[in-house]
Image (spheres, rainbow, N blue to C red):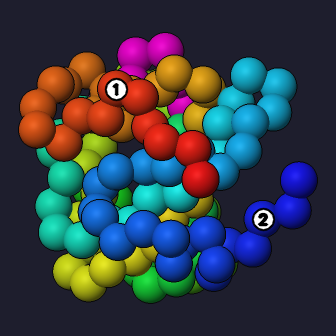
Amino acid sequence: MKVNLTTAFATFADHWSPRIAGELNGQQVKLVKFQGEFVWHKHDHEDELFLVHRGNFVMQFRDREVTLSAGEFLIVPRGVEHRPVAEQEVEVILFEPAGTRNTGDQRNERTVESPKHL
């Protein structure tokens, strides 16, 4: 299945609401737009990969920050508390196990239990 990322990202405008763009070997490829601050959270059983398609953002950890720009990725190991922050809109591709909740161990107004498929 071929996916054009620019076209796929253009199909939605909301922030912090991932869309499933593909699935393979129990993993999901999700597209999400960030802007502003997300919630502090962790995933006890899943590692997450954040790959920036357009823009940039800061991944905050309790002891440091990592700035990511287009073409860069970061793997957040399971159990590590983190919070993405984007001053301006950023487009991010997530690779994570199917069923991974976007807010990890937290449940709030930004929790997406069942992401939509593109």
In the picture of the structure, the residue carrying the numbered disc 2 is 3
**Can residue 94 be seen by looking at this rendering?**
no
Vertical order, 10 against 93 (above or below): below
Residue at (78% x, 65% y) in the render: 3
Give the farthest residue toward the left.
Answer: 109
In the picture of the structure, the residue carrying the numbered disc 1 is 113
Q: Which mark is residue 46?
A: none
Label 2 sits on what residue type? Answer: Val
Q: Which residues are magenta?
A: 42-47
Query: Image quadrant of residue 64?
Result: bottom left
Vertical order, 90 against 100 (above or below): below
**Can residue 17 be seen by looking at this rendering?**
yes
Label 1 sits on what residue type? Answer: Glu
**Residue 58 x, y percent position in the rendering:** 32, 68
Query: Is 38 positioned to the left or the right of 77 in the image?
Result: left
Instruction: Look at the image and say whether residue 45 sits in the magenta stretch.
Output: yes
